[in-house]
Image (tube, helix red, strand yellow):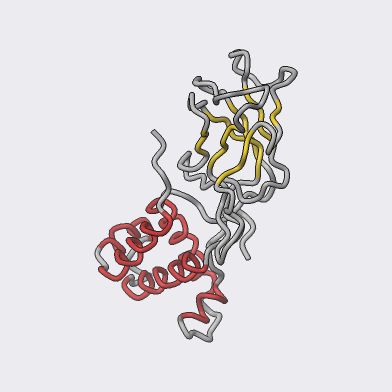
């Protein structure tokens, strides 16, 4: 449904279906509110739920351990697909990954975890890279800054239904409680913070989807 990381998690059409609203007259304003609520959810939960339109490079500090955590970095949830995944590691501590032998192979040098991320009723991102024991190239992720480059499509395989519905319900609360002629959307946090129903929705999302904190 949603392709770009900056898009709202629901369309005006979906919102009107949930809100039992037929008129399309306010669709532009509704979409603006849906987008603002989507960014609000991201800040509260600590990750985004769309996905990159194409693979992008991200640089990580090495962990000094056999596991490298990908989520929790600047709202990045993990990898949405293993197609196009490229992992390179700085093996000689020169702060680049352009030397021979620094490209790693999935299932030979590392695994994408959790193994069952794509299975079940709600496919989730792969959030970790685990070193394959006994491979001939790397035993741990180097403990240094700018040690690993991961090229991937980041995000969720699809926006979870719970996020879509929460976006619509929070938008409905915002539009009900906010006279459009007098209140700016810069007050969004204050408005929803005063709503017990809105805070219960956010608390439920945090329990289900809160990103790990990256220290």
- Position of the N terminus, as image quadrant, is bottom right
In the image, 209: left or right of 7? Answer: left
What number of labels is visible?
0
Looking at the image, is 81 positioned above or below residue 108? below
Left/right placement of residue 77 relative to residue 191 reads: right
Position of residue 89 relative to residue 180, above or below, is above
The C terminus - image quarter: top left
Q: Nearer the viewer, residue 111 or 194?
A: 111
| 64 to 198, vertically: above or below | above
Residue 99 screen position, x and y as percent: 72, 17
Q: Residue at x 56, y 66 (%)?
A: 121
Residue sitting at x 55%, y 55%: 124
**Viewer-nearest residue: 84 or 195:** 84
The residue sitting at 57% across, 76% down in the picture is: 13
Q: Position of residue 2 (x, y in %)?
A: 61, 62
Please tell me which residue is depicted at 53% across the width and 56% down the height of the picture.
49
């Amino acid at each position: 449904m949603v392709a770009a990381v900056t898009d709202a998690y629901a369309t005006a059409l979906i919102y009107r279906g949930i809100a039992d609203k037929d008129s399309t007259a306010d669709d532009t304003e509704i979409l603006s509110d849906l987008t603002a609520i989507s960014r609000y959810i991201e800040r509260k939960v600590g990750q985004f739920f769309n996905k990159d339109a194409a693979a992008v490079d991200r640089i990580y500090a090495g962990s000094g351990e056999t596991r490298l955590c990908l989520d929790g970095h600047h709202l990045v949830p993990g990898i949405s697909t293993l197609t196009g995944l490229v992992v390179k590691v700085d093996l000689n501590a020169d702060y680049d990954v352009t030397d021979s032998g620094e490209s790693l192979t999935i299932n030979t040098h590392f695994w994408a975890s959790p193994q069952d991320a794509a299975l079940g009723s709600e496919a989730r991102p792969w959030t970790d890279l685990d070193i394959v024991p006994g491979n001939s190239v790397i035993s741990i992720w180097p403990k240094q800054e700018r040690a690993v480059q991961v090229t991937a499509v980041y995000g969720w395989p699809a926006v979870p239904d719970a996020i879509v519905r929460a976006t619509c319900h929070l938008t409905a609360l915002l539009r009900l409680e906010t006279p459009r002629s007098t209140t700016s959307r810069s007050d969004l946090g204050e408005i929803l913070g005063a709503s017990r129903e809105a805070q219960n929705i956010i608390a439920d999302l945090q329990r289900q989807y809160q990103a790990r904190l990256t220290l």
